[in-house]
Image (tube, rainbow, N blue to C red):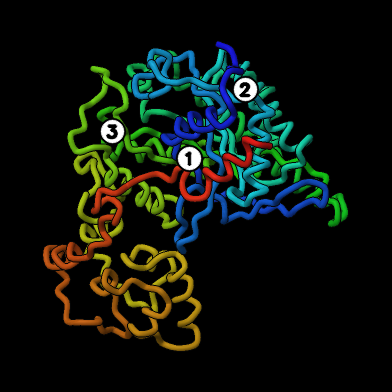
Amino acid sequence: MQIQENMSLMEKLQILSDAAKYDVACTSSGVDRSGNGRGMGNCIAPGICHTFSGDGRCVSLLKILFTNECIFNCSYCLNNCNNDIPRASFTPDEVCTLTMEFYRRNYIEGLFLSSGILKNPNYTMDLIYQTLYKLRVECGFNGYIHVKAIPGADPVLIEKTGFLADRMSINLELPTAEALKKLAPYKSRSTILKPMRQIQNGISNQALLLSDYKQKQPLRVQTKEFKQFVPAGQSTQMIIGATPENDFQIMSVAESLYRNFSLKRVFYSAFVNVNQNSDLPVLPGGPPLLREHRLYQADWLLRYYHFSVDELLSEDNPNFNVYLDPKCDWALRHLEYFPVEINRASYQTLLRVPGIGAKSASRIVKARRSAKLNFTDLKKIGVVLKRALYFITCSGKMMYPTKLDADYICENLLRDQTQIPKEIRNSGYEQISLFDVGMKESSRQISST
């Protein structure tokens, strides 16, 4: 396969931005970096993603594949080598042009670059490295870059790329090795985990070197002269629903990845049946978006609320409740821990109360040092009382006369429409397109440059 030269840049962009829509591993950047006075752009830790943030802001990456040509025939992938679809490939210069021009027009805040496998893993990884090198060194781009590492590529190429990227990710693809062998026979779990381990070791070694560097060097040169390796960490993605694993198996894999590979995030992608393949399941109800949502909620509990998978699920209860979020479901199964007295409970105990998040738990602990809290105070702090009121007391009293009974509480919680996301309730889920409002005009401008 050759990089195509007979398409315009905008034709390639249309194809390769659309081809990237099934890769969901975009999130906040996790790294702060100010402009260096010589290049263009900076990087703000909480502000880079390709969706609507919690406070309603829409922030975006240029999210593209380098190429949708691929030598593999993964059953679940639209870009597999057996599919008759329009194919395109960028050159490193073209990716640089798009990134810089969209950045100048304030349409993007960074770049998310993934790729199919062109010729072989080394050839593809080298093209990605050339792209990042041109962006950082020749174009002076100092913004956020998230890039996919290619399993099977030379470790030297992955290492060189890691010093230019902010975040790297390697898709686990499917939860188990057996599923991978069935649907993606040319990929193996060991080939995927090897570069994942390399990136983890590289990050750990750089952290030690940076600590030593800060002790020996003046403060004014610490951040300007020290090159960090993947400073925003690494992530991965699993496709959910293409194979028969239950939620307990999926979350156990995620917990193992967090523990053994120090990942920042595990992303869960609801399976979309884009190929007519007998090995793939039929989805009469469409992609399992609600299941994906529950997995993300549980993942949040693992990372920030000190839950373990064994507390949320078990072999006898292997799947999440579709009607209640995992935290509410856990609380209903463990009413022996409730009600919790707000003015005395520890921070760790408060985290386990439905309707109390990490921020509100911290605010409660801080506020009660100076005064006893009541339910009005909790509402001002940010506690979601319509969920929390069944599980808490203030100075020994509940908000309303409430039976501590699982059926009674469950019946009332089910009236909370926010238990199921609005976009799923209304069946209106759609990923943001690069060519939504305002982008087409900018595309025409870039075409003429």
Q: Earlier in the sequence, mark 2 or mark 1?
A: 1
Mark 3 Cα shell of 10 Å, populated few (<14), some (14-19), many (≥20) = many
Report x, y in % for residue 126.
66, 21
Marks 1 and 3, how far apart in space?
Answer: 17 Å
Marks 2 and 1, how far apart in space?
Answer: 18 Å
Residue 418 seen in the figure = yes
Kindly identify which residue carries mark 2: 125
Could you tell me the amino acid type at mark 2? Met
Report x, y in % for residue 374.
35, 85
Position of residue 390 in the picture relative to residue 30 (left or right): left
Q: Are marks 3 and 2 in contact (CB under 8 Å)?
A: no
Figure check: 277 above or below 400 = above
Could you tell me the amino acid type at mark 3? Gly
Q: Earlier in the sequence, mark 3 or mark 2?
A: 2
**Residue drawn at point x = 52 percent, y = 50 percent:** 438
Could you tell me the amino acid type at mark 1? Ala
Residue lying at the far bottom in this picture: please name it.
Answer: 371
Q: Earlier in the sequence, mark 1 or mark 3?
A: 1
Callout 3 secondary element: loop
Q: Which numbered dot is residue 241?
A: 3
Front one among 89 and 25: 89
Callout 2 secondary element: helix
Callout 1 secondary element: loop
